[in-house]
């Protein structure tokens, strides 16, 4: 009993948290201690806060809500707010991190050129979709493709079964990039295949995020993985030191097999995603499988992150399949996989969503686990609803984070007021990140509707135009809607006062959470 108590006290997560708190306390005590020595120093710090507030307001690339949150903090707590902002935004480590990542992306962009015929064909068929594709290619570096097959999975169990089947077919390489991996049935069955494939000479690389996974496992896990012949790396390994770099997590979920098959979506490698264990009721998640030419973009995305971590430069041509040997998939519309990075200040993930909302003619259906919106997204959603577009959003009934749910309800009221229809998925938690519009366009990926996904995380997704998967995504939305309960204005107004107050406060600092 004493031993178990000792283990709990020395729990790694607790120790990391206490270390961070201790650093924050030391910083704050040091700042306040300066006040005792000289009013001149205090006055100078106050002046710095005013200058800094002006600087924050005039920064070109920053979201207005993010600016407001920082300005409030700086002006409310002049010394503390200014110090925190400078500390988190002026670190050399952050600057080197951004510069190195952008350099790596530039080196690989030339290897994924746009087929001008495909882009022109899409523009002639639908000018709005063509312009979106041109934007993603010009500013993100990811082309639009044809000759690609897409298959949609409406639950994690379906994707899991397809993953195992496709992994068994691997002959050359397997690339895996995930935010979370956890021991359990799902990971064990995958590792069994990977170990066997490694013995057959298949090159296997596993990349996972340092925050999403590392705080839950030891270095021993990586050593065991590498003994199986699997190359394993941690992106932005978590360290218990205050740093803005820790905000930039690898939230992507990518599996690439031999350069001809890829998977992406919301599903991580953990048993709750396939409902082998229950955490928040039924876990509803989605994914897509891609076969054909468009897989090349996912291959490049993975190698960009891998080379950034390993400080090596792969010859990407080795991993590009011979297009003449790829199967012909016929007419399955257009697909454009894309990545979003916080280091280039281009809000690709959010702008793709905004484009779909603004161009919708009949309906826009959305599933998202989090609804923490900036002003641009609120304006787009409410304007679409006011204009007669059927705007429906499905969110979880059982949240995975209590404070996020309290904050989200603050947005629900504003959206419902102007005609946006919001529904709670009653069986449990919905982790899917889907958009579908007008029976023509859909997006499936890793991008949540919150500040972290839009501004801080490395993300990925795929836009599909007139692929067979689009109708499956719509049908799944309608089936999920049948298991959901609509949030009315009456429910919003009847919420406990304490939750309304808490939601209002959290909304004030939402961009900083």
Image: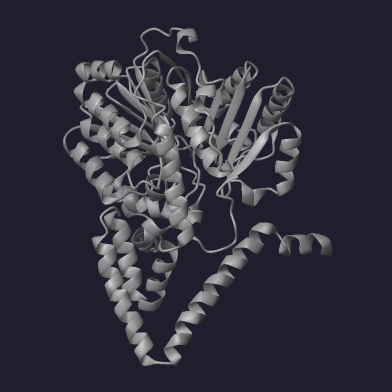
Residue 436 at x, y = what percent? 33, 27
Q: Residue at x 20, y 27 (%)?
A: 361
Q: Please identify the quadrant where the N terminus is shown.
A: bottom right
Whether residue 1 is visible to the viewer of this picture, yes or no, is no
Quarter where residue 8 is shown = bottom right
For the image, the number of numbered tags is 0
Q: Is residue 431 left or right of residue 166?
A: left
- What quarter of the picture does the C terminus occupy? bottom left
The answer to whether 124 is drawn above or below residue 132 in the figure is: above
Residue 83 visible in the displayed image: yes
Residue at (35% x, 33% y) in the render: 141
Could you say where residue 487 lies in the image, as x and y percent from the top left? 35, 43
Q: Residue at x 36, y 15 (%)?
A: 146
Residue 465 picture location, percent across and down:
32, 21
Extreme residue in the left direction: 387
Q: Give residue 506's position: percent from left, percent from top.
A: 39, 60
The structure residue drawn at horizontal position 54% and vertical position 75%, both measured from the top left corner, is 25
Is 236 left, or right, of 40 in this rendering? right
Q: How is the image coloured?
A: one colour
Relative to 489, 215 lies left or right: right
State the residue in front, 20 or 4: 20
- Choose top left, top right, bottom left or bottom right for residue 504: bottom left
Q: Nearer the viewer, residue 370 or 84?
A: 84
Residue 86 versus residue 193 in the image, above or below:
below
Q: Is residue 366 above or below residue 379?
A: above
């Amino acid at each position: 009993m004493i031993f178990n108590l000792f283990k709990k006290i020395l729990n790694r997560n607790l120790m990391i948290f206490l270390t961070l708190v201790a650093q924050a306390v030391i910083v704050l005590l040091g700042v306040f201690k300066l006040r005792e020595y000289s009013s001149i120093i205090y006055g100078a710090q106050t002046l710095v806060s005013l200058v800094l507030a002006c600087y924050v307001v005039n920064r070109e690339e920053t979201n207005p809500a993010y600016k407001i949150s920082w300005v409030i903090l700086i002006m409310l707590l002049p010394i503390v707010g200014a110090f925190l902002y400078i500390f988190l935004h002026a670190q050399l480590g952050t600057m080197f991190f951004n510069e190195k990542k952008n350099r790596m992306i530039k080196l690989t962009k030339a290897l994924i050129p746009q087929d001008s015929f495909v882009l022109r064909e899409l523009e002639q068929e639908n000018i709005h979709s063509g312009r979106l594709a041109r934007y993603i290619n010009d500013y993100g570096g990811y082309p639009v493709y044809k000759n690609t097959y897409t298959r949609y999975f409406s639950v994690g169990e379906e994707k899991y079964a397809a993953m195992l089947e496709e992994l068994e077919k691997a002959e050359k390489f397997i690339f895996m990039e995930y935010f979370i991996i956890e021991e359990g049935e799902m990971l064990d069955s995958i590792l069994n295949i990977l170990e066997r494939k490694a013995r057959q000479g298949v090159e296997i690389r596993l990349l996972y995020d340092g925050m999403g996974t590392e705080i839950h496992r030891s270095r021993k896990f990586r050593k065991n993985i590498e003994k199986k012949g699997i190359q394993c790396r941690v992106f932005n390994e978590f360290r218990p030191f205050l740093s803005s770099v820790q905000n930039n997590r690898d939230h992507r979920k990518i599996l690439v097999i031999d350069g001809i098959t890829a998977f992406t979506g919301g599903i991580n490698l953990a048993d709750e995603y396939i409902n082998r264990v229950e955490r928040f009721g039924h876990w509803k998640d989605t994914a897509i499988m891609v076969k054909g030419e468009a897989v090349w973009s996912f291959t490049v995305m993975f190698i960009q992150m891998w080379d950034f971590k390993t400080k090596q430069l792969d010859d990407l041509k080795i991993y590009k399949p011979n297009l003449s040997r790829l199967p012909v998939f016929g007419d399955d519309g257009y697909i454009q996989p894309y990545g979003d990075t916080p280091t280039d200040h281009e809000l690709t993930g959010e702008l793709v969503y905004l484009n779909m909302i603004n161009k919708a003619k009949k309906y826009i259906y959305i599933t998202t686990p989090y609804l923490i919106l900036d002003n641009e997204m609120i304006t787009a959603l409410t304007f679409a609803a006011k204009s007669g577009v059927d705007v429906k959003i499905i969110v979880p009934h059982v949240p995975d984070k209590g404070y996020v749910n309290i904050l989200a309800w603050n947005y629900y009221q504003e959206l419902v007021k102007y005609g946006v229809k919001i529904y709670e998925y009653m069986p449990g938690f919905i982790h899917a990140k889907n958009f579908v519009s007008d029976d023509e366009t859909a997006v499936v990926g890793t991008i949540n509707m919150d500040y972290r996904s839009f501004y801080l995380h490395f993300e990925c997704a795929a836009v599909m135009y007139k692929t067979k998967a689009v109708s499956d995504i719509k049908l799944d939305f309608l089936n999920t809607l049948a298991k959901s309960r609509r949030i009315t204005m009456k429910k919003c107004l009847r919420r406990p006062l304490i939750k309304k107050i808490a939601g209002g406060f959290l909304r004030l600092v939402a961009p900083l959470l």
